[in-house]
Image (cartoon, helix red, strand yellow):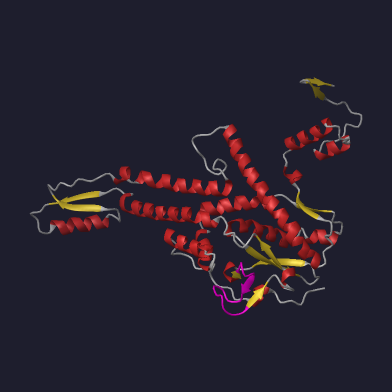
Amino acid sequence: MKSEREIIIHRIEIGQPHRGGQTIQTWINNLKAAENAVNTDRRALVNTYHDISVDGQLTALVEKRVLSLLNVPITWQGLRDERYIQNLESPWFFDLLQHIGKSIFEGYSLVELVPGKDGLIDDVNRIPPANILPFEKLITCQPYSRSGSVISYTLPPENKYVLEVGNPADLGLYAVLAPYVLMKRSNLADFARFNEMFGMPLRWYEYDPNDPTARDKVTEAAKAQGSAAYVVVPKGTKVNFVDAAKTGASSYEPFHDLMNREMSIVVLGQTLTTQQTNVGSQALGEVHQQVETEIAMKDRLMAEYLLNYKLKPMLIANGYPLQGVKAQFNLNKELTPAEKLKMWLEMADAGLPIAKEDLYNEFGVPLPKGRVTLTTKGGEVRK
């Protein structure tokens, strides 16, 4: 039966976060306001997060981190009703996982479940952070405001539709990443200004100081040659130039790379799987890959706990037959063929009964069915 409850996102005013004007000092001030234990205010920090989110390196890292929740299917073990199975495999659930992944960076978040005409969940809405008072458990109808109408999402009927992701004190990884993005942005602006001033060759023009019209003629000719920098001086003038390309340019790019590496370390715990370096080995690469894999596993465990202990009771309250059902990432589908074969052989060595037909089907190999076969044992191929 369709709920007559009005969707929260339709009851609140959504404001536009401000972009631009962010500095290291504004980040510090906004972070202090968000961490204030007496009067917590995250409204300004929302603008900081919105501003840094357009950085290319950070965007790629966020997508890579969130991907661990999206590239492995989730199974609801024990669920037999095909109608609900299909619903839990529909686009709204994929969007929900994306919101859960983004909360790692944005901190405490609220996601509203939207039922469709058949009573099943049809869509999800992310409640704008500027409308959330985390510690009061309230949604404000006016963004960036503590006055006016509010909605309590822990009381009926909203507690059946509003999912809390994270804890109210969680500010997310953007709080740590912001200074790296802002310093990199400032460095790029300085580099662009440097290239504008010194990136093109400097042209040197001399004129006869005894000719009163010579300077104007030479200057006019210099301007006609394009926008590159030029110097017009009387003949015999001596000017010493410091080679700016050698003294200044070499510092911008390393600083840019340093900021990107720091962001990679914060998000993925390492840099070797995201940036090319001049040092490294296969063993080092495997270590870095293992760190990234462990972080992905941690994110999946976090998502599983959220689905089983917060989302599932809400779905049950909406009529889903999930009693005794457990949501779990199906990691078997992520294993490579070599890893799968090793796992099957280890189970066989442990004495677990495995049907040969299942083994053949797993790897897409047809059964011999009386045909001549090849086997290897001890490195020797036998018929």
Closer to us: 94 or 99: 99
Q: Is residue 253 visible?
A: yes
Residue reaching furthest to the bottom: 148
- 148 drawn magenta: yes
Residue placed most toward the observer, 255 or 37: 37
Residue 183 appears at what percent x and percent y? 43, 54
Where is residue 40 shown, x and y percent of the image?
Answer: 54, 67
Q: Quadrant of the C terminus?
A: top right
Residue that appears at 72% across and 72% down: 155
In the picture, the quarter occupied by the N terminus is bottom right
Quadrant position of residue 309: bottom right
By secondary structure, the bulk of the magenta-drawn segment is best described as: loop
| Rendered location of residue 23, percent (x, y) | 43, 60
Q: Specify start and end residues of the magenta stretch as a single range.
A: 133-149
Taking the view exactly as shown, the residue that stands out farthest to the front is: 38
- Residue 70 visible (yes or no): no
Residue 355 locus on image (x, y percent): 89, 36
- Left or right: 374 in relation to 248: right
Assess whether residue 204 is covered by the magenta stretch: no
Q: Looking at the picture, does residue 128 appear above or below residue 52?
A: below
Query: Left or right of 308: which side holds 358?
Result: right
Q: Is residue 336 left or right of residue 370?
A: left
Q: Is residue 257 depicted above or below 305 in this figure?
A: above
